[in-house]
Amino acid sequence: MIDLRNVEKTYYSNAGDIHALKKTNLHINAGEIFGIIGLSGAGKSTLIRCINMLEVPTGGQVFVDGQELTAMNNQELRKARQNIGMIFQHFNLLASRTVYDNIAFPLEIQGISQSEIKKRVQPLLELVQLQDRGDYYPSQLSGGQKQRVGIARALASDPKVLLCDEATSALDPQTTKSILDLLKDINKRLNLTIVMITHQMEVVKEVCDRVAVIENGEIIEEGSMIDVFTDPQKPTTKDFVKSINNVELPALLQSSSISAVYTEGSKLIVRLSFIGNSAGDPIVSGMVKKFDVDINIIYGNIDSLKDIPFGTLVIEISGSAAGIKNALQYLHEQQLKVEVIGYVS
């Protein structure tokens, strides 16, 4: 649905040029929810605004639904943008218009008749669960309700792509969850391609199918949400994941007392990651029964990645050298990720 090919964006000034995007290549499939995560100033908002050409790239090509937006004139671009909806962090609603009129606004600009507008707006009010708020003004709405109006307005033109620029960062956690649930529902019902810009890893793990991490104008890591979350490669990605799944070892185990070599009486420290069905398997108890070892659980956590169970466990295995070796081999044979931290006395 979306292809970015060597897209660059440079802001020129006398104080010095700012390279906001550097030869960015990205492929986003139809019907998926794609997350772009990065710190403030990383270039993520510039990237999403290049997709609908609110920011004209300095170089490269932008394709949406097979059409090259970077090759279009202004009239062609206005028509192509009807297939791209956008919602914003601060809602951008017109204070003098009711909820109904805010949703109808982009259709009025297109010259669509009032009867046709009514046919489109009423179902959208129901979709975002604001059917009893059509005559309200933005000042009478909560933050979550305002964002629902923004979503309905973005869907008014029946777009194929929905761009979300920090759409939940101004909302409280409970409201954020309700908006994310709504976006997941819209994605399934309408088979809508959704691109989410965020600095919140909670958002990524809740709704995204795939994710890209951007830093200093460059995509530094990209993959399925589960792969990026469970096996981050870059320091920035690891920091994002750590903010959600804090599995830092206790200070005692981070010291120089950890060794890579077994000595008599040593205990092996292992970090386990469970994904999917294996998160519910009795692997640790099975290991105790099969081998002559004792297990001490140092840390444990279970969560979900877009409805897929995901757990992390840090354990201490004690016993004979042979028992520990066999137990470790058993863990490697299971459907989970095994990270050996080392031995402690």
Image (spheres, rainbow, N blue to C red):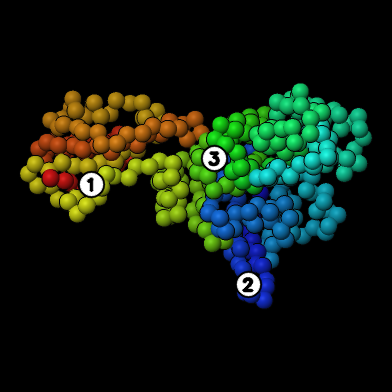
Number of disc labels: 3
Q: Is residue 76 left or right of residue 229?
A: right
From the viewer's side, name the closer residue of 181 and 40: 40
CA neighbours of label 3 inside 10 A, class few (<14), some (14 to 19), many (20+): many
Pointer 1 residue: 253
Locate residue 142, reporting x and y percent: 68, 33
From the viewer's side, name the closer residue of 103 and 281: 103
Locate residue 204, reporting x and y percent: 53, 41
Query: Reading the chain from its start, which is encountered first: label 2 or label 3?
Result: 2
Callouts 2 and 3 close, C-beta under 8 Å: no
Q: CA distance from mark 2 to mark 1?
A: 46 Å
Pointer 2 residue: 17
Q: Residue at x 60, y 33 (%)?
A: 175
Pointer 3 residue: 203
Q: Amino acid at mark 3?
A: Val
Locate residue 328, reporting x and y percent: 21, 39
Could you tell me if residue 165 is visible in this image?
yes
Q: Residue at x 70, y 36 (%)?
A: 146
Q: Amino acid at mark 1?
A: Leu
